[in-house]
Amino acid sequence: MSTQPGRHLAAILVSDMYGYSRLMEKDEAGTLSRQKNHRRELIDPEVVRHLGRIGKSTGDGLLLEFPSATEAIQCATTIQTSMAARERDVDPDQRIIYRIGINVGDIVSEDGDVFGDTVNVAARIEALAEPGGVCITEAVYQLVLDNLDIHFIDMGSQRVKNISRAIRVWQWTPLSKSLQPE
């Protein structure tokens, strides 16, 4: 049964495993097993804790929807910080590391899936994130600026594939806190 498309505001988080093809080539079974454990023990519970829902799941990525930009960022930074600790003892060449992009805006929902420019921009800025980092758009930054004690670095206006306008992007990495001015 198909439902009519609807529009609503949401924060969209897109994540991708950095170096997925390389990891799969070196140790397919081990990579898949660790990824399943990370999903079960960390990622899925954090998504629920921050009121999110999984819109799509691929072998190496997720598209998540949140009711607020604050919840999306808190989820993302918790996952990234926790992943660094969880993978600390793994050979650096074998570590599972994610890149995350977050955008907020109007989305189209149909049959449990989400579409639209907001989703496309989140996917494009994810590719700009340093491995282990989180990139957010200016729209997200303005919404959370006074709500979170998380330091983002201004990457300026960025041109991304198949988006005609420049997107101002901000980035957080686990090191960003130590770079914050006193």
Image: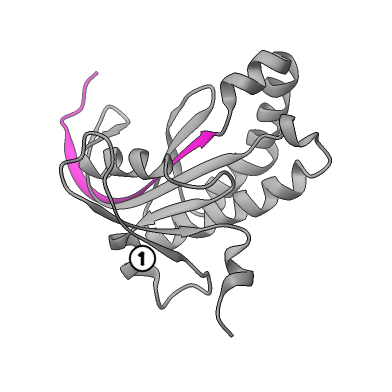
**Which residue is the site of mark 1?**
141
User: Where is residue 106 shown, x and y percent of the image?
Assistant: 20, 49
Residue at horizontal 75%, vertical 41%? 87
Q: Quadrant of the C terminus?
A: bottom right
71 vs 122: above or below: below
Q: Residue furthest right?
A: 89
Residue 6, quarter of picture: top left
Residue at horizontal 79%, vertical 45%? 88
- Residue sitting nearer the eye, 95 or 4: 95
The residue tagged with tag 1: helix, strand or loop? helix
Residue 89, quarter of picture: top right
59 vs 145: above or below: above
Q: Viewed as shown, does residue 45 lie left or right of 156?
A: right
Q: Is residue 113 magenta?
A: no
Q: Quadrant of the N terminus?
A: top left
116 vs 73: above or below: above
Q: Viewed as shown, does residue 143 lie left or right of 22?
A: left
User: Where is residue 3 shown, x and y percent of the image?
Assistant: 20, 27
User: Where is residue 90 shown, x and y percent of the image?
Assistant: 80, 36
User: Where is residue 96 shown, x and y percent of the image?
Assistant: 66, 34
Residue at horizontal 69%, vertical 51%? 82
Q: Is residue 2 magenta?
A: yes
The three-letter code of the residue at mark 1 reads: Tyr
- Residue sitting nearer the eye, 42 or 164: 164
180 vs 6: above or below: below
Q: Viewed as shown, does residue 89 lie left or right of 142?
A: right
Q: Residues within 10 Å of mark 1 (few under 14, many from 20)?
A: many
In magenta, the rendered stretch is 1-17
